[in-house]
Image (tube, rainbow, N blue to C red):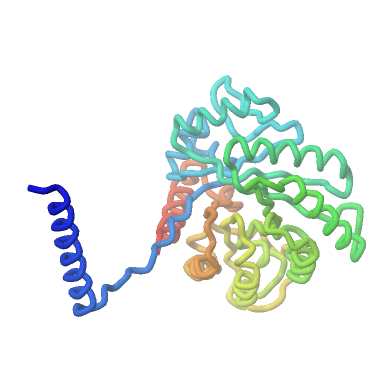
Amino acid sequence: MNSSYELTRRSMLQGAAGLMFSSAVQAGPKAEVPPAKSKPWVVACRDSLLKPTKKPDSWSAMKEIGAAGVEVEVGFDMGCPALYAPNEPYSLATASGIAALNDKLAEQKLVVTSFLMANRFDERLDEELEWAGKLVQAAQALDVKVIRIDIASRKTKGEEFQAFAAKLCKQLCAMTDGTSVRYGIENHGSVTNDPQFLQKLFDSVDSPHLGLTLDTANFYWYGHPLEELYKNFERFAPRVFHTHCKSIRYPEEKRNVRRPMGWEYDKYACPIYEGDIDFGRVAAILRKAGYSGDLCLEDESLGKYPEAEQVEVLKKEIAMLKNLGQAS
């Protein structure tokens, strides 16, 4: 058969088939497109919560309580003091130390969701900036997306500190240009639990690299009434990069009134499944804002429980966060 004829015939058949398919689509009911599901949030924990498991290393401890990720505290010397293994201290001070941690994470199929710095910016600014620069490089190498920072007023006060913090955060953000690393200021202590301070700071810096490590209990600790917490969560949800999930159970008559900062915290701090904060509501607020970070457990009530019960408390909290973190 003539090849040009065959080509023409094949084209006609394909065209007819395409026309029939097009007609069928037009004539039939419109297909329902299911909404895209968001990715489940990684459920993590502070590295300081791992030793009560009595496991020989941080990685088996994480698996014991069910955490897939961990927030790692990094010291001024770039060491990781709360990560542990027999005869295997972890440090980010050298390329070989970073590679060793990276290899261990890959081997264990676990992740570091964030680094934590305990900063003293207004006491030793140059040293702190140098430290932050090193940690940004380590975060890049390990694909850690968030560094938790503490913007605390130690020497500088009032409006002077507001201006200092804005200039500082611009310097920090300049270090992350061209990277995927972001800073999460924790709402913490007497300064950054003030929503007005936070809002002014975010507005002044105006950088996609600066956001919030949302500590769910710290606004409550500061004295904000319970219902005001959710307004603050909604206000800052688009800027949340990372979380600290913890709770408090105050007497009913103290929940929706203004309390002194830190009022009876040691007495009323509790696991997240017993506290006043509605974590289902928190999760809904974050999900609506498009949050894609972790749910990181930070239980500051664990010492109230006998050692034999502490692991079960952590397991129960992690299971609750996993349920909340599922895609929807």
Residue at screen point 46% across, 56% down: 321
Question: Relative to 50, does residue 94 appear above or below in the rendering?
Answer: above
Looking at this view, name the residue that lies furthest to the left: 1
Question: Relative to 87, does residue 60 appear above or below in the rendering?
Answer: below
Question: Relative to 109, does residue 103 appear above or below in the rendering?
Answer: above
Residue 232, given in percent of the width and then of the height, sits at: 65, 72
Decide if residue 174 is on the left or right side of residue 60: right
Looking at this view, name the residue that lies furthest to the top: 87
**Splitting the image into 4 quarters, where does residue 262 fall?**
bottom right
Residue at screen point 16% across, 70% down: 20
Residue 209, given in percent of the width and then of the height, sits at: 69, 54
Number of numbered markers:
0
Q: Is residue 261 visible in this depiction of the protein?
A: no
Q: Which image quarter is the C terminus in?
A: bottom left
Decide if residue 325 is on the left or right side of residue 234: left
**Splitting the image into 4 quarters, where does residue 93 fall?**
top right
**326 or 323, which is in the foreground?**
326
Residue at screen point 59% across, 43% down: 144
**Splitting the image into 4 quarters, where does residue 9 fall?**
bottom left
